[in-house]
Image (spheres, rainbow, N blue to C red):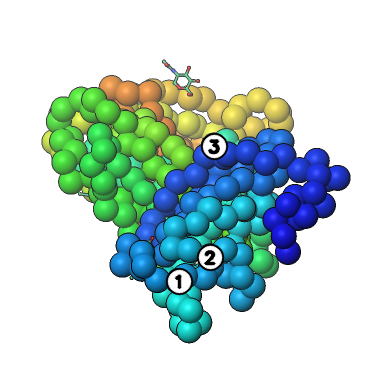
Amino acid sequence: MDLCVFCLLLLSLQCVKGTATYYTLKPNVMVVVRERGLSMTQVPLLCGESYERDTIVWRIKGREVAQGNQVNVNVVMMQGGNYTCHAQSGALLNHTLVLVQAMDRRILDRSPDSDYLHCLSKNYSGVFQCSWRWSQTRKERAPDLFLVTASRSSVELTCTLGPSGQSITCRDHSHCPYSEERRRITLAVYVKNQFRVEKYTQAFYIADIVKPDRIPVTRLDTRSLEWGYPDTWSTPGSYFPLTFQVKEISRRHNCDCEGHGRRRCRMALHTTEGLQWPVRRGFLVCVRAQDALCNSTWSDWSLVRTNSTGAGGTKNNRKQKVKVNNRKGEKGL
Ligand SMILES: *[C@@H]1O[C@H](CO)[C@@H](O)[C@H](O)[C@H]1NC(C)=O
Ligand SMILES: *[C@@H]1O[C@H](CO)[C@@H](O)[C@H](O)[C@H]1NC(C)=O
Ligand SMILES: *[C@@H]1O[C@H](CO)[C@@H](O)[C@H](O)[C@H]1NC(C)=O
Ligand SMILES: *[C@@H]1O[C@H](CO)[C@@H](O)[C@H](O)[C@H]1NC(C)=O
């Protein structure tokens, strides 16, 4: 179809032609950033430097759209497509995938307490994990993870995709656990659905995303508990101190008990740097840890059940048994 006619047709649909921002995401992939009010834009395509003197034909879905090694094609903002270039014989020479980057977010879900990307580190080693969730409505349409880039001070970090396809583990080899971070890590996750691409970014310091693993709790004797630093926490502990929160709650409740709301959930909250705690009869104990020097994320609670023969009554603690629910090895992601 003649392009002018095409545009005239679109004029009734408020065709606005202009120049949108575009960039090369990776070899053979160009991204056009969608702009409000712009329904069509021109994008330059190059078949290959060695084809300068050849007769080149560009096609999309087999339909010819332009001629020449270096051409400008009109990209309708909602669409994008896979442009192939061919020799006069029809032989395929190269291709450029043109994706349209949408401004709205549809492919990933935002979690209630966080952003679209959820990044955590168990320590200050420079290794961190980020995860995301495909939006429920998009699940059947199988969106792809297209590209993940992570860098700090323009140095690329190495990342590997987790088995679920919804998380990555990255490593900043140059990160020094003992010195203050000067620059943030920037993470970009590109997810795609057909020719639509969405870009999700996050910038953070390791110190912002540190979350200790669940702490291991053991029974010292019938009257007290003892806990230690998680194996995955940075050493030495004297340089990376943890602070602990101890929550004593009435039975049949769990560590989510906030003390308000339902009347039956009684609790007392304590903060300590110590590693031991006396068991109070008739109560459950929950313990969690946080970096003592930064107000970063608390670990998940470790719940300690103390089986006793009913609340109140005698002071015979001998029958108490302690079951430590310290789900070690459980992934935080
Ligand atoms: C095909 O296109 C890519 C991306 O534009 C370019 O890097 C590559 O050199 C081209 N291949 C040939 C054979 O020219
Ligand atoms: C685009 O076309 C090229 C050449 O036919 C093909 O190798 C490539 O897989 C296509 N990409 C997509 C996303 O369809
Ligand atoms: C440090 O934390 C990362 C994840 O954030 C973990 O993979 C690694 O095993 C931890 N290091 C040690 C020594 O446990
Ligand atoms: C620590 O962070 C929490 C949650 O972000 C915030 O509510 C609290 O006020 C902070 N505490 C201090 C001492 O900065």
Q: Is mark 3 within 8 Å of ligand 4?
A: no
Residue that badge 2 annotates: 67
Q: 51 or 102: nearer the eye?
A: 51
* Residue identifier under label 3: 114
Query: In the figure, is residue 85 to the left or right of 276?
Result: right
Can residue 86 be seen here? yes
Q: What residue type is labelled 1?
A: Thr
The quarter holding residue 331 reads bottom left
Horizontal side of 318 relative to 41 (left or right) equals: left
Q: Which of marks 1 and 3 is nearer the N terminus?
A: 1
Q: Can residue 233 be seen in this view?
A: no
Q: Which of 163 and 141 is in front in this view?
A: 141
Residue located 57% across and 48% down the image? 42
Q: What element carries label 1?
A: loop
Residue sitting at x 39%, y 56%: 26
Q: Which residue is painted at 40% across and 71% down in the image?
A: 54
Side of 230 where 187 appears, left or right = right
Q: What element carries label 3?
A: loop
Q: What element carries label 2?
A: strand
Q: Which amino acid does label 3 sit on?
A: Ser
- In the rendered image of this protein, does residue 56 appear above or below residue 136? below
Residue 86 at x, y percent in the picture? 48, 75
Mark 2 surroundings within 10 Å by alpha-carbon count, few (fewer than 14), some (14 through 19), many (20 or more):
some
> How far apart in space, not on screen, are marks 2 and 1 (Cα)?
7 Å
Which residue bears the numbered disc 1?
A: 55
Q: How crowded is mark 1: few (under 14 residues within 10 Å), some or many (20 or more)?
A: few
Badge 2 amino acid? Gln
